[in-house]
């Protein structure tokens, strides 16, 4: 009876294809998610009002233009530090509808209390 042998290099190629393929599909899935670009600076977010759909993932890409700020939306359990000059990516999957306030939770100056916005989540 003929013995079937699998050469190690074939297994190696198979594993490489598997790993690359898995990574590629993950990248594709992330690319399909809507990206919402925002900025944060003394003492405002732009845009300050965003609208999302319940259950639909999005990625907030927030750039802090002038200094360290925070992004805190307790109702949606979003909390991030926004480092100066960096893009902070926050993946959000809203689980409930409503209008939810967010604010800067890092004291950044005299207008800090006004650094607010809302996330509206619709069905
Ligand atoms: Cu602040």
Image (cartoon, rainbow, N blue to C red):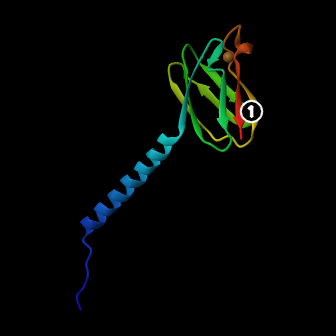
Identify the residue at horizontal 22%, vertical 88% (top origin).
2
Q: In the orientation shown, which residue stands out farthest toward the front?
A: 123
Secondary element at image label 1: helix
Q: In the orientation shown, which residue stands out farthest toward the top?
A: 110
Q: Nearer the viewer, residue 51 or 100?
A: 51
Residue 69 is left or right of residue 14, and the answer is right
Q: Nearer the viewer, residue 104 or 59?
A: 59
Identify the residue at horizontal 24%, vertical 65% (top origin).
9
Identify the residue at horizontal 71%, vertical 37% (top origin).
122
The residue that disc 1 covers is 74
Q: Position of residue 69 (x, y in %)?
A: 62, 20
Ligand 1 falls in quadrant: top right
Residue 103 is left or right of residue 61, and the answer is right
Q: Is residue 51 above or below residue 22?
A: above
Q: Nearer the viewer, residue 8 or 118?
A: 118
Q: Position of residue 109 (x, y in %)?
A: 68, 9
Q: In the orientation shown, which residue stands out farthest toward the left?
A: 2
Q: In the rendered image, which quarter contains the C terminus?
A: top right
Mark 1 neighbour class, 10 Å CA radius: few under 14, some 14 to 19, many 20 or more: few
Residue 50 is left or right of residue 39, and the answer is right
Q: Is residue 15 above or below residue 31?
A: below
Residue 86 is left or right of residue 96, and the answer is left
Q: Position of residue 112 (x, y in %)?
A: 70, 13
């Amino acid at each position: 009876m003929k013995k079937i042998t699998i050469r190690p290099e074939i297994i190696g190629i198979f594993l490489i294809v598997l790993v690359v393929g898995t990574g590629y599909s993950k990248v594709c899935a992330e690319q399909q998610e809507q990206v919402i670009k925002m900025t944060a600076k003394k003492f405002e977010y732009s845009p300050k009002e965003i609208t999302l759909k319940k259950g639909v993932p999005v990625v907030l890409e927030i750039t802090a233009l002038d200094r360290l700020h925070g992004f805190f939306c307790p109702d949606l359990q979003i909390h991030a530090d926004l480092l100066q000059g960096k893009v902070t990516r926050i993946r959000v999957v809203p689980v409930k509808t409503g209008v939810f306030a967010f604010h800067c939770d890092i004291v950044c100056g005299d207008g800090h209390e006004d650094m607010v916005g809302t996330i509206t989540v619709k069905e």
